[in-house]
Image: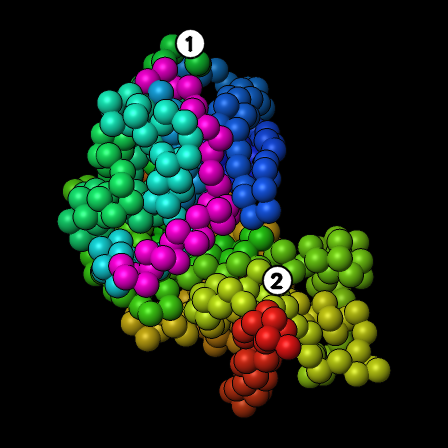
């Protein structure tokens, strides 16, 4: 009987399920949205039960669309929004809303810790202390939810990122993988264990924490009441690491960029732990008794800038229109757009930077603004790649995500980084990565070599821009960024 792999992709606004065959084709998929909650300014939450229910609906929809029953599923892989923090009891009942990675409620707490312990945290975890990661979120829950710390001290509750919560609901096992553990700010990426000093710093009992396993192994089997049979759950990776795996970036120096609301650029650094002042060091995955590391650059606003052209300025009706507008003009004519709506992420890390459009004249049209927006996405991506190239050689860039359908953007990206930009046939690389990890654990796929051969190129964009023009355009971008940096502080001081 032919079997298939089920991948669960639990994002920030929706739960997805995709069913893949041996050739990486999608047989069926389901997607179900769930709400975010904003109890106070800067606070972002989910209801974990709504995440779970959305995931179950997505699974059932995918099976229906694929016209197969659960008996045809060889194994299940999970990929997830990272850092989001959930606590639950032994029955799988959440004890508070999930605190989402975007939530800033613990910013002040982290700022106090950063001054004294920033270097220690970076050395142990590869991360720059920030409210983004799970440690401060979990401390906030223990300190602010009545009775939670007492229950934690008695070993009555469990903590996990979203993958861990879903695995617990599916199988009853309390586990996570190396890639997700490395985003908590509590995991020592050298020793590959929860770090006692960091647990003490954040006042977190070890009994709450999941067991950390490889990204590809059998964690448990689904309870019969969920899908009517026991199916192995055998793949787990954070969404960006899963995309790196789904892009078959298995060798050191291979880099992928995911173009979404923001851009996430990851470089496989193999067995080497490389530290950068302006990038995060993280675990890519654990496989076959070994751990692969990665450098990561997070750009906060890319696709969201295109949404702003649509919803804020109302100069486009949908995202695809930007390409038509951009190619109507021969150049940006000196117009640059720095989309620092929420500050700037890697490599600038300036929370006080603000958005800026510069170089406008009476001759500036919506075509120039659209073009400048697309070019900004490419410039921001180059900023991160340049930072990576201080430590590794980047030969090419593999791309995925919604904006990669934009041929103008992809060609400009190749031109401005002076490297080939490669768009694969299968764009669902996050789900595909989770599927590959799950399949390898049950020998559905035999090896990385087999997976490498499944990865197919849809189109390669080669650089055609001359060096003088590339230098001039990028120098203009750097000048525009300088003017956007620290703007919120400048205005405050007036």
Label 2 sits on a secondary structure element that is loop
Which label's residue is closer to the chain start, 2 or 1?
A: 1
Residue at which label 2 appears: 341
Q: Answer whether residue 445 is visible to the viewer in this image.
A: no
Q: Residues within 10 Å of mark 2 (few under 14, many from 20)?
A: some
* Residue most extreme to the right: 362
Q: Residue 419 versus residue 351: which sits nearer the camera?
A: 351
Q: Answer whether residue 310 is visible to the viewer in this image.
A: yes
Q: Quadrant of the C terminus?
A: bottom right
Q: Residues within 10 Å of mark 1 (few under 14, many from 20)?
A: few
Q: Residue 65 versus residue 240: which sits nearer the camera?
A: 240
Q: Residue at x 57, y 88 (%)?
A: 472
Task: Give the tally of numbered discs.
Answer: 2
* Residue most extreme to the bottom: 468
Task: Name the side, left or right, on which 298 lies relative to 215.
Answer: right
Residue at which label 1 appears: 225
Residue 177 image offset from top left, x and y in percent = 29, 38
Q: Residue at x 79, y 54 (%)?
A: 317
Residue 52 image offset from top left, x and y in percent = 49, 24
Q: Residue at x 56, y 48 (%)?
A: 42
- Do the residues under discs 2 and 1 have CB atoms within 8 angstroms? no
Magenta highlight on residue 380? no
Residue 464 image offset from top left, x and y in percent = 55, 78
Q: Which residues are magenta?
A: 90-118
Residue 23 image offset from top left, x and y in percent = 43, 38
């Amino acid at each position: 009987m032919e079997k298939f792999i089920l991948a669960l992709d639990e994002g920030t606004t929706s739960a997805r399920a995709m069913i893949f065959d041996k050739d990486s084709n999608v047989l069926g998929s389901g997607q179900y949205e769930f709400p975010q909650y904003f109890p106070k300014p800067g606070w972002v939450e989910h209801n974990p039960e709504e995440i779970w229910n959305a995931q179950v609906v997505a699974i059932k929809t995918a099976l229906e669309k694929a016209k197969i029953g659960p008996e045809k599923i060889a194994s299940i892989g999970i990929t997830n929004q990272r850092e989001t923090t959930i606590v639950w009891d032994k029955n799988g009942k959440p004890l508070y809303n999930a605190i989402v990675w975007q939530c800033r409620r613990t910013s002040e707490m982290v700022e106090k810790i950063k001054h004294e312990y920033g270097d220690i945290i970076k050395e142990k975890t590869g991360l720059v202390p920030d409210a983004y990661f799970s440690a401060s979120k979990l401390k906030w829950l223990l300190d602010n939810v009545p009775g939670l710390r007492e229950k934690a001290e008695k070993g009555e509750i469990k903590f996990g990122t979203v993958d861990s919560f879903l695995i617990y609901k599916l199988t009853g096992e309390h586990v996570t993988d190396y890639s997700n553990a490395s985003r908590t700010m509590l995991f020592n990426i050298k020793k590959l264990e929860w770090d006692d000093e960091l647990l003490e710093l954040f006042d977190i009992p070890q009994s709450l924490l999941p067991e950390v396993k490889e990204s590809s192994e059998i964690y448990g089997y689904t309870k019969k009441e969920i899908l009517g049979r026991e199916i192995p759950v055998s793949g787990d990776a954070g969404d960006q690491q899963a995309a790196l795996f789904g892009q078959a970036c298995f060798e050191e120096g291979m880099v992928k960029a995911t173009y979404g609301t923001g851009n996430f650029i990851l470089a496989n650094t193999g067995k080497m732990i490389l530290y950068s002042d302006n990038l995060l060091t993280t675990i890519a995955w654990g496989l076959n008794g070994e751990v692969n590391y990665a450098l990561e650059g997070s750009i906060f606003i890319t696709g969201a800038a295109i949404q702003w052209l649509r919803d804020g300025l109302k100069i486009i009706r949908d995202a695809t229109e930007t390409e038509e507008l951009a190619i109507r003009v021969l150049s940006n004519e000196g117009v640059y757009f720095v989309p620092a709506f929420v500050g700037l992420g890697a490599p600038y890390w300036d929370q006080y930077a603000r958005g800026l459009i510069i170089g406008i004249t009476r001759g500036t049209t919506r075509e120039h603004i659209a073009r400048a927006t697309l070019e900004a996405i490419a410039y921001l991506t180059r900023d991160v790649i340049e930072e990576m190239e201080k430590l590794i050689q980047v030969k090419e860039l593999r791309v995925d995500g919604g904006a990669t359908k934009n041929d103008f953007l992809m060609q400009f990206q190749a031109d401005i980084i002076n490297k080939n930009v490669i768009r694969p046939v299968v764009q669902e690389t996050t789900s595909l990565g989770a599927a590959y990890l799950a399949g390898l654990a049950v020998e559905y796929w035999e090896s990385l070599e087999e997976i490498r051969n499944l990865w197919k190129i849809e189109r390669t964009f080669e650089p055609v821009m001359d060096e003088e023009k590339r230098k001039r355009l990028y120098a203009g971008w750097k000048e525009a960024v300088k003017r956007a940096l620290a703007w919120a502080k400048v205005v405050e001081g007036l």
